[in-house]
Amino acid sequence: MTSAAALRHLLSKDVCHVMPCCFDALSAKLIAQEGYDLTFMSGFAASASRIGAPDLGLMSYAEVLDQVRNITDATAIPLIGDGDTGYGNAMNVRRTVAGFAKAGAASVMIEDQLAPKRCGHTPGKAVVSRDEAFDRIRAAVDEREVLRAAGGDILILARTDARHEHGLGEAIERAAQFAELGADILFVEAPRSEAEMREVCRSLPGPKMANIVEGGDTPDLPNAALHDIGYSIAAYPLSLMAAAMQAMVTTLRTMRDDQRPDLMDFTELRSRIGFDDYYETSERYGSSRRAHSDPEADA
């Protein structure tokens, strides 16, 4: 089963999938090890991790694509990649979709923000016109169909940030048109109450994604409530990044005070990174290993 097919299968289930978001290969690997069915490469977290800068359109397409490849190489669970605005016009959107598919992503998110984009729960967001927004999704869907005809596949996650500037009604109308154009998953960013979340899910067809930013605009509801509202995916874009940063800052302060921090056991750390798997697999090639350890073998 392809990654895209695996994601479709997950979305066919009557559940709301809890989706911790990754930012690099290691965080994605931990998500898979803990039994989660899918993950999302958070642009906010990836920008912070890779270039140490805020998610304000500073990462290039090539940098984002490289991060996607690293993640898909490290884990087999379906990955949704953050394609931002598509990095240009409609033709750039098509290239972005094709690149993410070739890199192994199960889905790519394309949004209607004005470039350079901003994190969905930060000030200063603006969206492009309806026509430009629709062209982006139309181009993404067109490229998806080209990929399918050639034996490839990817799902299109269409996002609108219109709620911030133009209200919930405009956001829902845009998302409804995204669905008409063929988007596979719909994402209305930053509804501000449970009532708004219910209106989104009641008004729109197909799978919907909720984006839960701790301290953000959207209520942080239990998974059972999100399922009852009608969401298929609950994304948590900053939970792992915030936890990791808090742990690192605490450890640094502890070490500065000449104390020993509370750390993951070295044995578990090695195992989770993959040392045990590496050594177990390498045992299959004993003759090669002996050749490197026995000088006479080279003669």
Image (cartoon, rainbow, N blue to C red):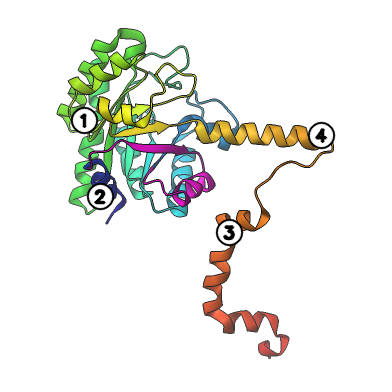
Q: State how far apart marks 4 and 2 are (Cα).
A: 49 Å
Q: State how far apart marks 3 and 4 are (Cα).
A: 28 Å
Q: Which mark is residue 5?
A: 2
SS of the residue under disc 2: helix
Residue flagged by tag 2: what amino acid is it? Answer: Ala
Asked which quadrant contains residue 100, the reply is top left
| Left or right of 258, for residue 91 | left
Q: Mark 1 = which residue?
A: 138
Q: Position of residue 4 (x, y in %)?
A: 28, 47
SS of the residue under disc 3: helix
What is the tally of numbered marks visible in this picture? Answer: 4
Q: Quadrant of the N terminus?
A: bottom left
Residue 46 is inside the magenta segment:
no
| Left or right of 56, for residue 128 | left
Residue flagged by tag 3: what amino acid is it? Answer: Ser
Residue flagged by tag 1: what amino acid is it? Answer: Arg
- Residue at image position (58%, 69%) is 279
Of mark 4 and mark 2, the one earlier in the sequence is: 2
Number of residues whose C-alpha sits closer than 10 Å to that of mark 1, classed few (under 14), some (14–19) or many (20 or more): many
| Left or right of 150, for residue 288 | right
Q: Mark 3 = which residue?
A: 271
Q: Which mark is residue 256?
A: 4
